Image (cartoon, rainbow, N blue to C red):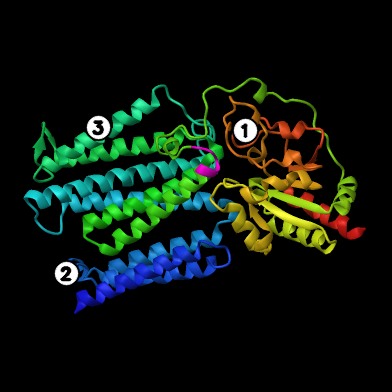
Amino acid sequence: MMNSLLTVAYLGAGILFILSLGGLSTQESARRGNVYGMMGMALALGATLLHPAVQEYAGGAYGLLAATVGVGAVIGAVMAARVQMTGMPELVAILHSFVGLAAVLVGFSSYIAPLEDLTGTAHAIHSVEIAIDIAIGAITFTGSVVAWVKLRGKLFGKWISGKPLLLPGRHFLNLAMLVGIITMSIFVVQAPNPQAAILGVTGLTWLVVISIISGILGMHLVLAIGGADMPVVVSLLNSYSGWTASAAGFMLGNDLLIVTGALVGSSGAILSAIMCKAMNRSIWNVVFGGFGATPAVSSGGQEAQGDFIEIETDSLTEELKDAKNVIIVPGYGMAVAQAQRAVDDFTRILRDNQTNVRFAIHPVAGRLPGHMNVLLAEAGVPYDIVLEMDEINDDFPETDVVMVIGANDICNPSAQTDPASPIAGMPVLEVWKSKRTVVLKRGRGKGYAGVVNPLFFKDNTRMYFGDAKASIDKLNQSLRAD
């Protein structure tokens, strides 16, 4: 009877998770998708606590389990409540690392103290599942931690930065580590128990070495990826965390964990593939490292190509008043300045003046897939004027004014004109084709990819320096005053 109820509960949770993914596919239904996801997770946790195996092995430890879940819930609630929208990519990355670390710990626990004695083929299959779970979990853990550090940009800055770390022969190194992991996994399978020695080394020791090498592999893969492409990395790590959970499900014999992990893994992989296609990149470059980086960089692409031409608030106000078509290109600078509400106010003022205002969203704008969409939705910007790059890129020549707010690499012409640029081949928003391009920028430095942007020196470009929120607030006051 209990097993039947658990099956129904797991089936219900699985359906809720599928509905959650469906809800998250559009901005309008994203809130509903989150609710479905929370309901599914609550149902899954409750059903798992009632599982006969948990009741048998937990014994009187339900109080400890409740305390553990309670502590985790409190920590998660505090982290979610305190994080700013600008810190959301880092939060996602560190949560992915928790999934990987949990999988590694569960894998070792299952190997050292299995729930049942297994021999022969059953033991071999279970050992393979453990090795796969620990390997993927360790890659996810260390890769996510490195991504978190890269996104933070404050810790270990001398050693880990947005720039890619390209070691000589890095692909051979990755292949060697992968072969080593597979070879040692065979030794783990051959060991009848954790203390049995294969080639003079116990099975448990081989498993520890697998986790260490997998962790190094995860670090190396993400270190070799350029900072401008971190949204793709976050998406890929999301996929890794899903496959980690699915592998843990096979190891534990938990059908819901298998299904849920597969959903997360496949959706993350599909999103990564879509983003790579939009950026004219190969997903294999992401998987094996070196994505977003080119060893050779032209000297011309790293030098300033002219003088900045600044624009005053009054002059910009007049141009905006006369404009019939305005496109706003948001970037990470808007997120850092928390200027999304000011931008929404700016949009409303222009639309009240009968100006056609739209937003152009690049696939990797910000530090997280859909980062700009989330910020604009939070501020209340209408969904129907927020367009993807493919939908709006051809409209720039007919646009009177383009407002680039805190964006840099995603509208860099060198992606099309400089084959040696680190961002060469990446589709960009062709803002320079508009009649007037106004760039709101906090300073005069390079973008996250470390590349000089020729856009800033074009004849039809004007620079409006300052904090994005303060600058937009100043413009709003000027537009209202006249």
The residue that mark 3 highlights is: 180
Residue 417 location (% of width, % of height): 65, 28
Residue type at tag 3: Gly
Real-space Cα distance between discs 1 and 3?
38 Å
- Please tell me whether mark 3 or mark 2 is closer to you in this view: 3
Real-space Cα distance between discs 1 and 2?
60 Å
Asked where in the image residue 136 lies, by quadrant, the reply is top left
Q: Residue drawn at (43%, 46%), measured in percent from left and top?
A: 236
The residue that mark 2 highlights is: 56
Question: Does the residue at mark 1 contact the one at mark 3 (Cβ under 8 Å)?
Answer: no
Residue 295 location (% of width, % of height): 51, 23
The residue that mark 1 highlights is: 415
In the image, the segment drawn in magenta is 277-281
Mark 3 or 2, nearer chain start = 2
Number of marks in the image? 3
Residue type at tag 2: Glu
Query: Callout 2: helix, strand or loop?
Result: helix
